[in-house]
C-alpha cells in the first residue's frame, strides 16, 4: 500500500522533498523531470535535479528518490538512464504525462501518447540499459486528446518491461480539471499484470479511500495536495493502521515555512527563496484560511529576511 510523492516541476524540488518526507507517510518520491534531447546530459544537470544521488539516492530522512527522465529519443533516454543508475539512483521513471505545450512541442511528455509504439521503444530501451535490480517505471495520462489509446499505451509500457506504471486519470486535454476518471484506472488494471499506481484528485484521506474503492489500486501517488496538505500522506498512513489521523495546525505549518526558508537560503538567493515561499502559500491557501492573510502580508516583500520577520509575528 505504497504512497508516493509525485514530481511537480518548480514545486517539489529537493528542499520540498526533504521537508515532506521528513514529516512521514511516503514510501518513495520522484524528481522533477530531467530533460533529455540527444547525447549525454552533464553530470551537474543531473545532480541539480537529483542531489540525493550524492546521498545513496535518498532524502535526508531516508526516503528513496527515483529520477524521472523526459524525452522522445529512445537511444538518448537509455544512455542517460544507464548513467543515472550507475550514479546510484534507486529507480528510473519515464515521463509520458507532462501536459506542458512547450514540452509537448519539443517531443516530450504527453505528446508521445499519440504513438504507443514510441512509448514501447523508449521503455524497452531504458529497461535494457538499466540493471534488472533497479526498477523502471513510467507515468502516463489516459491519452492526449481522448482516451482512445489509453489501454494501448498502458500495454506498451508493460510490454516494454516496466516494473510498474503510474496513471494520471486524465487526458492531456483535461489538464487538471476535475474530476479525475478513477474508473479508467480499474479498466487499465484489468488489462495489465504489473502494478498500477493511481494519480489524480487524491486531496483528502476520504479521497484516498474512495479512489482505492473505485480504481482497485492499492498504491497511490500524490502531487498538488501533498504541497497544500503537508501531512496528507501521514494522515492516510494513520488511517491504514486504524489510528487517529491528526492534522497539522497552522502554527506548525508556519514553522515549516520558516524551516524551509532557512534551508533554501543555503543554496539560493534570498529573493528566490521569497518567491518559492509565496508559491507554496498559493497551495496552502486552499487548505488553511490563515494562509490567505499570510500571503497578503508577504506578497509585496522581496527577500526571505523581510518575510521571516512577518511570518514569526
Image (cartoon, rainbow, N blue to C red):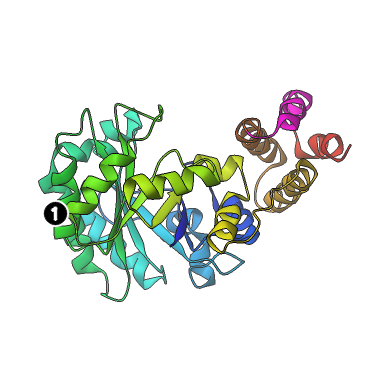
Q: Nearer the viewer, residue 232 or 173?
A: 232
User: Which SS type dominates the magenta stretch?
Assistant: helix
Which residues are the magenta region? 287-301
> Percent from the top left, x then y, of residue 120?
15, 53
- Residue sitting farthest toward the right: 313
Which one is in front, 51 or 166?
166
271 relative to 75 in the view: left or right: right
**Residue 57 lies within the magenta run:** no
Q: Is residue 291 magenta?
A: yes
Q: Which residue was labeled with disc 1?
A: 121
Query: Does residue 48 lie above or below 63 as drawn?
Result: above
Relative image position of residue 35 (x, y in whole percent)? 35, 47
| Left or right: 146 in relation to 241 | left
Residue 74 or residue 168, whichever sits in front? 168
Residue 33 in sight: no
Give coordinates of residue 12: x percent, y percent: 53, 47
Q: Residue at x 39, y 50 (%)?
A: 212
Judge from the rendering whether residue 233 lies leftward or rightward of residue 215; answer left or right.
right
Amino acid at each position: 500500500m505504497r504512497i508516493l510523492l509525485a514530481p511537480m516541476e518548480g514545486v517539489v524540488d529537493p528542499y520540498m522533498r526533504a521537508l515532506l518526507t521528513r514529516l512521514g507517510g511516503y514510501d518513495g518520491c520522484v524528481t522533477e523531470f530531467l530533460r533529455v534531447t540527444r547525447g549525454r546530459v552533464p553530470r551537474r544537470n543531473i545532480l541539480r535535479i537529483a542531489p540525493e544521488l550524492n546521498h545513496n539516492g535518498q532524502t535526508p530522512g531516508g526516503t528513496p528518490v527515483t529520477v524521472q527522465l523526459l524525452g522522445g529519443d529512445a537511444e538518448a533516454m537509455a544512455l542517460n538512464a544507464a548513467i543515472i543508475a550507475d550514479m546510484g539512483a534507486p529507480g528510473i521513471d519515464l515521463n509520458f504525462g507532462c501536459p506542458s505545450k512547450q514540452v509537448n512541442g519539443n517531443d516530450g511528455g504527453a505528446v508521445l501518447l499519440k504513438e504507443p509504439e514510441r512509448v514501447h521503444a523508449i521503455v524497452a530501451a531504458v529497461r535494457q540499459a538499466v540493471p534488472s535490480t533497479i526498477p523502471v517505471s513510467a507515468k502516463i495520462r489516459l491519452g492526449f486528446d481522448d482516451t482512445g489509446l489509453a489501454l494501448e499505451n498502458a500495454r506498451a509500457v508493460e510490454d516494454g518491461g516496466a516494473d510498474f506504471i503510474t496513471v494520471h486519470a486524465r487526458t492531456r486535454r483535461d489538464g487538471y480539471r476535475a474530476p479525475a476518471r478513477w474508473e479508467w484506472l480499474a479498466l487499465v488494471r484489468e488489462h495489465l499484470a504489473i502494478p498500477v499506481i493511481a494519480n489524480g484528485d487524491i486531496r483528502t484521506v476520504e479521497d484516498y479511500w474512495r479512489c482505492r474503492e473505485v480504481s482497485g489500486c492499492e498504491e497511490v501517488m500524490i502531487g498538488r495536495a501533498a504541497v497544500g496538505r503537508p501531512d496528507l500522506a501521514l494522515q492516510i498512513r494513520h488511517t491504514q493502521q486504524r489510528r487517529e489521523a491528526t492534522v497539522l495546525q497552522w502554527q506548525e505549518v508556519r514553522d515549516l515555512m520558516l524551516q524551509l526558508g532557512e534551508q533554501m537560503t543555503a543554496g539560493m538567493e534570498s529573493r528566490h527563496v521569497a518567491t518559492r515561499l509565496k508559491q507554496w502559500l498559493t497551495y496552502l491557501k486552499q487548505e488553511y484560511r490563515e494562509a490567505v492573510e499570510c500571503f497578503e502580508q508577504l506578497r509585496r516583500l522581496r527577500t526571505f529576511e523581510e518575510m521571516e520577520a512577518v511570518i514569526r509575528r
